[in-house]
Image (tube, rainbow, N blue to C red):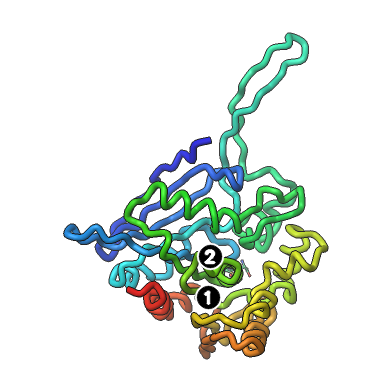
Amino acid sequence: MESGLSEIGSTKMFDGFNKRYKHYSETLGCSMTFSIYFPPSSTSSSRKFPVLYWLSGLTCTDENFIIKSGAQRAASTRGIALVAPDTSPSEPHYIMSLLVYPVCIVTIWVLIFVGGLNVEGEADSYDFGVVGAGFYLNATQEKWKNWRMYDYVVKELPKLLSENFSQLDTTRASISGHSMGGHGALTIYLKNLDKYKSVSAFAPIANPINCQWGHKAFTNYLGDNKAAWEEYDATCLISKFNNLSATILIDQGENDQFFPDQLLPNKFEEACKKVNAPLLLRMHPGYDHSYYFIATFIEDHITHHSQALKL
Ligand SMILES: N[C@@H](CCC(=O)N[C@@H](CSC=O)C(=O)NCC(=O)O)C(=O)O
């Protein structure tokens, strides 16, 4: 099936453009939205922009980061494109369905409107399911089989970008995120060191197998198989490395309402120390979990990634 990529928004900012797109995702089996900030292009150069993927947290769409972070100021200056996907399969879509009418033996094609993915319980809580809580993993449980945000972010989206946006150089990519998206950024980076030049995170869920958010999501998406849980836990994954060279940047607010119980950055720090993984964990007195915190320090993250992307 065609991706049906269409532009649904365009707003000028810092001489570049925030663009919003909709497409049908084969991986997730539904329509998805994502946003790209394109820095200003110099008319005299055909230079392609490297990409910084941003993964947002619980309850978010692709728009929270674009609207609230102010990251475009530094991205414009540095010449980095920002790509922000949605956080779970959630968009309403139409499907073609074949009906076989039993009496007349007539086959009829009908267009059926599907709101969400129609999975029982998908919208019951803010920290699980369709309301922005895909956790950037590939679910193994039949009921949640459409929840394959890991494959969507790592495979489908970069392919879609490289096929449709000649101004992007998806071979030069870095990844960052917040909270659930910080967990996504760290795990995706550690599992794909060949695809991403650097990683950073704000208040990531750094050890999900040991917190309530992680338990709820992993039990539902992955079942009882604890080995499968560890494959999506940054603290477990980092323990497997002893030759990481690029510094991992993490910012954590000390007044964060979810710190430390849901986030556990200290567990990640301990694991990094054991394998000599370079980690810069910055604790910030007074800051909470919000986008005010992210907006305050996002420029440092853009600088961190622009160095790795050699800009
Ligand atoms: N509704 C919840 C709080 C939800 C929340 O704080 N979401 C964060 C991400 S949390 C981890 O993944 C967020 O980024 N929200 C969107 C925003 O624009 O701020 C509650 O009531 O506790």
Residue 244 located left or right of residue 73: right
Q: Give me the residue at 54% from left, 54% from top.
A: 155
Q: Is residue 68 visible?
A: yes
Gap in Å between the C-alphas at discs 1 and 2?
A: 10 Å
- Crowding around mark 2 (Cα neighbors within 10 Å: few <14, some 14 to 19, many 20+) is many
Q: Earlier in the sequence, mark 1 or mark 2?
A: 2
Secondary structure of residue under mark 1 = strand
- Expressed as whole percent of the image width and height from the top left, the position of residue 25 reads 55, 45
Residue 20 located left or right of residue 58: left
Q: Are marks 1 and 2 in contact (CB under 8 Å)?
A: no
Residue at the farthest front position: 243
Mark 2: C-beta under 8 Å from nearest atom of ligand 1: yes
Amino acid type at image mark 1: Ala
Q: Is residue 250 visible?
A: no
Secondary structure of residue under mark 2 = loop
- Expressed as whole percent of the image width and height from the top left, the position of residue 110 reads 61, 23
| Residue at the spot of label 1 | 201
Query: Of discs 1 and 2, which sits in the foreground?
Result: 1
- Expressed as whole percent of the image width and height from the top left, the position of residue 219 reads 78, 62
Most foreground residue, 43 or 116: 43
| Residue at the spot of label 2 | 56
Q: Give me the residue at 17% from left, 59% from top.
A: 44
